Image: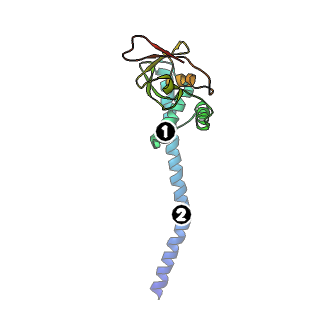
Amino acid sequence: MKRRVRTVAAVAGAFMAGVVVGPMVAAWAQDGGRADAYRLLNLFGDVFERVRAEYVEPINDRDAVENAINGMLTGLDPHSSYLNQRSYRDMQVQTRGEFGGLGIEVTQENGYIKVISPIDDTPAARAGVKAGDLITNLNGNSVQGLTLQEAVEQMRGERGTAIKITIRREGADRPIELS
């Protein structure tokens, strides 16, 4: 019986020690994690300053930080990303469907906008745009020097508005003008 009382007392003592010491160990571990996180943030700050000071071209601070944030999120999983205020507004417009477009899937190639495919029953498909076409001009202005996003924004507009596009098509002798 004495042995049983000692065992119960030892177990109860260990339990009480766990109750008292456990939160202290957890707090210590968490503080250690925070300290490590702050060391890593300091490393990021050091790298950021070094890039600002020594990169071959001047960098835009906002773009650099937004790219770093986006890199962190896309590194977690392929479905997470950062949207700055402008990208968030664009996403809202796209999901609301309050814009009109040509109805083409595009990419950028050698500074031009390349049509991946026209979408069936859209203005582009009806105008004769074909996969592989290179859009060289929008409303008479060259697309050279524009980002893909900037070109897409110019091609997007209110429903029913017209845009003049110039296309270079393989096998065609001259550029094709479409409205």
Tell which circle, 1 or 2, labels the residue nearer the N-terminal end.
2
Which x, y percent locates residue 135? 47, 19
Q: Amino acid at mark 1?
A: Met
Give SS at disc 2. helix
Q: For the view shown, which residue lies furthest in the left direction? A: 171
User: Any mark on residue 99, and which?
Assistant: none
Q: Residue 63's quadrant in the figure? A: top right
Which x, y percent locates residue 45? 52, 32
**Residue in the picture at 46% in, 23% down:** 129
Which x, y percent locates residue 15? 52, 71
Give neighbour class at mark 1: few <14, some 14-19, many 20+ (Cα, 10 Å): some
Give 114 or 83, whichever is nearer the viewer: 114
75 is higher (above) or lower (below) than 131: below
Give 50 or 151, whichever is nearer the viewer: 151
On the image, numbered disc 2 is attached to which residue?
21
On the image, numbered disc 1 is attached to which residue?
72
Q: Amino acid at mark 2?
A: Val
Give neighbour class at mark 2: few <14, some 14-19, many 20+ (Cα, 10 Å): few
